[in-house]
Amino acid sequence: MTETFTYLCIGCPLGCRLEVDEAEGDIVEVRGFSCRLGKEFAVQEHTDPRRLVTTTVGVDGARWPRLPVKTTGTVPKALVREVCRALAHVRVRAPVRLGDVVIADVLGTGVDVVATRDLPTTS
Amino acid sequence: MIDASPRMLYERYDVVVAGAGPAGLGAAVAARQAGAERVLVVDREAEAGGILQQCIHAGFGLHHFGVELTGPEYAQRVLTEALDGGVDVLTDAFVLDIAHDRRVRLLTGEHGVATVASGATVLAMGARERTRGAVRIPGERPAGVLTAGLAQRLVNLHGLLPGRRVAILGSGDIGLIMARRLTLEGVEVVGVFELQAHPNGLSRNIVHCLHDFDIPLHLSTTVVDVHGRERVTGVTVAPVDDDLRPQAHRAWEVPCDTMLVSIGLIPENELSRQLRLRLDPVTGGPVVTSTMETSRDGVFACGNVVHIHDLVDFVSEEAALAGGHAGRFATGWQPPHDNVRLQPATNVAYCVPHTVTTERDHTVYLRVRRPLERSVLRLSTPDGRVVHERKLRYVVPAEMVNLRLRASLLEGFHGDALLVEVLPR
């Protein structure tokens, strides 16, 4: 008994329609990809979907009150909201440099949350 | 490093660029590399980087830098390239006018009104969002109706939430991105309503921003009424028929305190109009040659001011082209004139550039009018002789098509116009 699952590839703007055939819990065929990354994405999305998280944290002493941040790698899709919740009350102080670690190993995922821009102190 | 405005202005620059977003900064760097010595970029915001500064999500840079970046990271890279490349970036300033001899009149916070001479200019003013007024939604005029991009600025830069329960009209990328952004900030997004039968944003945004958070996307549906005296209390939505007419008897009420509109961008062309540049009625931007020169000598253009891009990477590509040619123009080098007009035909809304030459390779950007699963891009002569064909997959209006048009493809072609079509196969 083979079941087909469909995914939309998000690796690039092409947006390939990916199909994964599964039989008795094993992937038996992947179709619809147009590059190696697409095939890997289909398998990944089927077995362990992961997402990069981008949000902001509070920052004092800078031009803007918010500092944009991202996870340095993907986290399990199910943890995206929890990562944002963990960052909700974080505040840092300017100056900040792009790449500065805001939270290391967030929620034990092994990835850090880092600043995605320089934010100098305002005079 | 973000605030690096020059303390003084020179009387003359080789190239002056209007707009310090990715288009303007990219053009400035390319102009320097092409031999222009003094290059000035002018931006009305307090910091350079353009709209990327508020686009905190990832997905930028894969084509241009070979790595996935967030908007602010992309902005910082191009700004660093510009400053390291010897470009002057003047923020908190505005280009008032460009005279026929290319003297540029500036209004600046620090220097007042100043006039500088330029050898060439580049228009890189970007785009602005269409507002509620552009689609004439009836109803009351309460607070709580704003564009998706304004909401993005409020949330990501100012740390302010626009509301607690939000409906989104239009499935443009900014609206989709904001659906996720607001959800992650604890706002309830009740749905995205799209007039067309197909989504207007990139497919990965549909997956990442809507599917991931179970936000409903209602296709062929639009907002027909807005309620609320002081503040939005809800909207009425209705499905539309094949002619996009709302079906009033099938309408339903959606309680919400905010409506975001994400219904497209319009090239910001006040300056282009003032300069009486030839404009393309479809793109809303200037008509450009294969060197990105507008209908006025020495005035170049690139980025969203020319046509709306879905990826900043292609803006950077176009900016390098425009800036390189502006730099060469300023230093006295003129390329051969274009000899072929590109004519959008079946299922092609527009092509940029509008003309090409058979002497060089080009990248032609085009947008289709209707989605097609399997299609073929065809270049042919007006009398029907096929010059070139390329198979395409899944073309949709929301995603730009890039055609690498090599000079060798046009070797046997001696006409002055090429029809560009995207047909089913």
Image: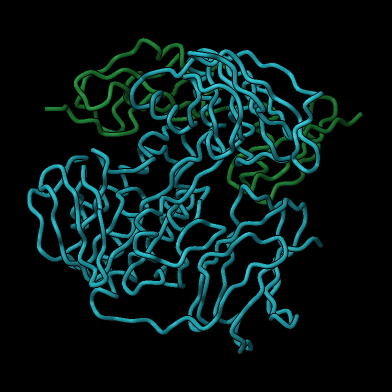
Determine if residue B311 is in view.
Answer: yes
Q: Give residue B316's position: percent from left, percent from top.
A: 41, 55
Q: Give residue B324's position: percent from left, percent from top.
A: 33, 68
Q: Residue at x 51, y 71 (%)?
A: B362
Q: Quadrant of the N terminus of chain B?
A: top left
Q: Quadrant of the rendered structure where residue B202 is?
A: top right
Q: Give residue B89's position: percent from left, percent from top.
A: 20, 50
Q: Residue at x 64, y 67 (%)?
A: B344
Q: Quadrant of the C terminus of chain B?
A: bottom right
Q: Does B94 appear above or below B326?
A: above
Q: Quadrant of the rendered structure where residue B236 is?
A: top right
Determine if residue B186 is in view.
Answer: no
Q: Would residue B2 appear left or right of B360 to someone viewing this image? A: left
Q: Residue at x 53, y 31 (%)?
A: B177
Q: Does B86 appear above or below A59?
A: below
Of residues B208 and A110, the one drawn nearer to the viewer in this rendering = B208
The mark total stands at 0
Q: How is the image coloured?
A: by chain
Q: Would residue B296 appear left or right of B412 to someone viewing this image? A: left
Q: Does B16 appear above or below B110?
A: below
Q: Would residue A19 appear left or right of B399 to someone viewing this image? A: right
Residue at the extreme left of the image, as rendered: B8
Of residues A85 and B251, the one drawn nearer to the viewer in this rendering = B251
- Check the rendered structure and report the hue given to chain B: cyan
Q: Does B29 appear above or below A13?
A: below
Q: Which chain is green?
A: A
Q: Give residue B54's position: percent from left, percent from top.
A: 38, 33
